[in-house]
Image (spheres, rainbow, N blue to C red):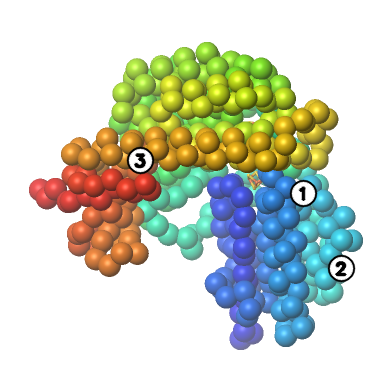
């Protein structure tokens, strides 16, 4: 028997990439590679990359520099780059990085076993062609090796929105929905293996099915997923505000399995900036959707993303972002300084705000959010939360899980509760988690 070869995967960027890395692992297992957590002993290292901001892109080069040294010790070692930087750079990446063996794009995961085989024979290759039909989402084996209580399920890929700052439509291609029969099959198989919670994944899940004939829309898909027995909780990410429809809002009232949390990025608070970002909604429309969600689910937890220092954003615009945050009352927020991305529309916009000013705005925004997050966490003290127990926490003797609203809750209890939904009384709030006590019986 030949010795199994070892694969190391480093994942950057969003949940899409986390999910793609699982698929890469499953595909390469079929090609004789077992996963290792130790990069220094690997025979194949794959970087699954992100290009959403310049900093994320630069990381790839520093990691590659680090892994180059391993080639001296193991001349058989192959280095591959996949994901969004690979898609953006293609062949150029092989020219820039002479010791790189493989480049594969975001639509080419299924070709990896062939590509790796060719690389083992000494070929250097880049495969970054787009496949623009739903077949590209059906080409993967279900990753039977991954287990867990909570799993991600890709329901669509790509994006047609072309927000003026964003590279995703260029590196992930056009929006394509996976067939609902495939999605439900995968979820049923997961439920059979003990999975309790699924998170439906896509760049813009709210527009699921709108371009496909004979498929449900996103609200319809949620209803079908809720019908899978064994699945007790459903989440989804990411949502685009313009596509939050009344039937989807109704799901929060009608489907008890649908968790009380939505990630709904606003990106900015002023209409001027929103319009220049090509977001397709006004501040008023965004707030109306939030109000409609809160009306049907008063305890709904809202998280989001915000960009500061977009070209043309002045102090008054920025204050509108801060006031929007207060009006919404975000449970948590990811915030970024605008980063110029190749090919995007906003790359042509004149940008007069200094780096220092942008940094200062980011700090003001983040300090407001920290305060709101802590206040939000404190508001749970004295309440009873249903927690899906996911595992043992780093602190000895405690279990951790998430409330329906997606807060992390730690509490002392027996590990036999892992995988169960239990009632927990919240007794203390921290910046990033809650402390609770198990309510027995
Ligand atoms: N599809 C998702 C997320 C896309 S990328 C959505 O539409 O919500 C994740 C986040 O990165 C975005 O929500 C945005 O806040 C941020 N982002 C994207 N492009 C950026 C850029 N050029 N500079 C700074 N932040 C950016
Ligand atoms: Fe990027 Fe906008 Fe698409 Fe989100 S919706 S991925 S921010 S273009
Ligand atoms: Fe990054 Fe690509 Fe996701 S650019 S955010 S890894 S879709």
Relative side of 195 to 11, left or right: left
Residue that extends furthest to the left in the rendered view of this protein: 441
Which of discs 1 and 3 lies nearer the camera? The answer is 3
Give the class, few, some or many, for how many residues have Cα within 10 Å of label 2's Cα (few <14, many ≥20).
Answer: few
The structure residue drawn at horizontal position 74% and vertical position 42%, both measured from the top left corner, is 171
* Image-quadrant location for residue 167: top right
Q: Which of the two discs, 2 and 1, labels the residue nearer the N terminus?
A: 1
Q: Which of the two discs, 2 and 3, labels the residue nearer the N terminus?
A: 2
Residue occupied by mark 1: 87
Residue occupied by mark 2: 98
The structure residue drawn at horizontal position 47% and vertical position 60%, both measured from the top left corner, is 146
Give the class, few, some or many, for how many residues have Cα within 10 Å of label 1's Cα (few <14, many ≥20).
Answer: many
Q: Could you tell me which secondary element the residue under label 2 belongs to?
A: loop
Quadrant into which the N terminus falls: bottom right
Q: Could you tell me which secondary element the residue under label 3 belongs to?
A: helix
The structure residue drawn at horizontal position 35% and vertical position 40%, both measured from the top left corner, is 374
Quick one: 111 or 157, which is closer to the camera?
157
Q: Is residue 295 visible?
A: yes
Residue occupied by mark 3: 374
Q: Determine whether 276 is above or below 127 in the image.
A: above
Relative side of 133 to 89, left or right: left
Which of discs 2 and 3 lies nearer the camera? The answer is 3
Q: Determine whether 404 is above or below 1 in the image.
A: above
């Amino acid at each position: 028997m030949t010795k199994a070869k070892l694969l190391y995967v480093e994942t950057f960027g969003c949940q899409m990439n986390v999910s793609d890395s699982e698929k890469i692992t499953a595909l390469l297992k079929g090609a004789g590679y077992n996963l290792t957590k130790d990069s220094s002993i690997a025979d194949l290292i794959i970087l699954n990359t992100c290009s959403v901001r310049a900093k994320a892109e630069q990381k790839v080069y520093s990691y590659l520099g680090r892994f180059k040294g391993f080639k001296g010790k193991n001349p058989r070692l192959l280095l591959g780059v996949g994901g969004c930087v690979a898609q953006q750079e293609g062949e150029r990446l092989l020219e820039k990085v002479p010791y790189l063996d493989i480049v594969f794009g975001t639509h080419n995961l299924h070709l990896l076993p062939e590509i790796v085989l060719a690389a083992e024979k000494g070929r250097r290759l880049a495969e970054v062609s787009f496949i623009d039909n739903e077949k590209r989402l059906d080409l993967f084996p279900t990753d039977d090796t991954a287990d867990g209580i909570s799993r991600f399920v890709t329901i669509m890929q790509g994006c047609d929105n072309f927000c003026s700052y964003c590279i995703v439509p260029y590196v992930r291609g056009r929006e394509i929905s996976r067939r609902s029969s495939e999605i439900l099959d995968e979820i049923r198989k997961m439920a059979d293996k003990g999975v309790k919670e699924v998170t439906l994944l896509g760049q813009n899940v709210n527009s699921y099915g709108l371009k496909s004939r004979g498929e449900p829309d996103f609200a319809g898909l949620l209803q079908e997923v809720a019908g899978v027995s064994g699945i007790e909780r459903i989440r989804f990410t990411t949502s685009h505000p313009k596509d939050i429809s009344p039937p989807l809002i109704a799901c929060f009232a009608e489907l008890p399995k649908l968790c009380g949390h939505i990630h709904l990025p606003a990106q900015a608070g002023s209409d001027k900036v929103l319009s220049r970002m090509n977001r397709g909604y006004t501040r008023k429309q965004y707030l109306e959707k939030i109000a409609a969600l809160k009306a049907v689910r008063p305890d709904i937890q809202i998280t989001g993303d915000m960009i500061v220092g977009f070209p043309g954003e002045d102090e008054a615009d920025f204050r509108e972002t801060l006031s929007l945050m207060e009006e919404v009352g975000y449970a948590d927020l990811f915030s970024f300084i605008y980063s110029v991305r190749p090919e995007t529309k906003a790359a042509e916009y004149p940008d007069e705000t200094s780096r220092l000013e942008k940094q200062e705005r980011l700090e003001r925004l983040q300090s407001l959010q920290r305060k709101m997050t802590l206040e939000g966490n404190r508001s749970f003290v004295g309440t009873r939360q249903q927690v899906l127990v996911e595992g043992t926490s780093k602190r000895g003797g405690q279990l951790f899980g998430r409330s329906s609203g997606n807060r992390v809750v730690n509490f002392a209890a027996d590990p036999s509760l892992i995988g169960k939904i239990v009632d927990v009384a919240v007794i203390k709030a921290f910046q990033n988690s809650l402390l609770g006590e198990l309510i027995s019986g």
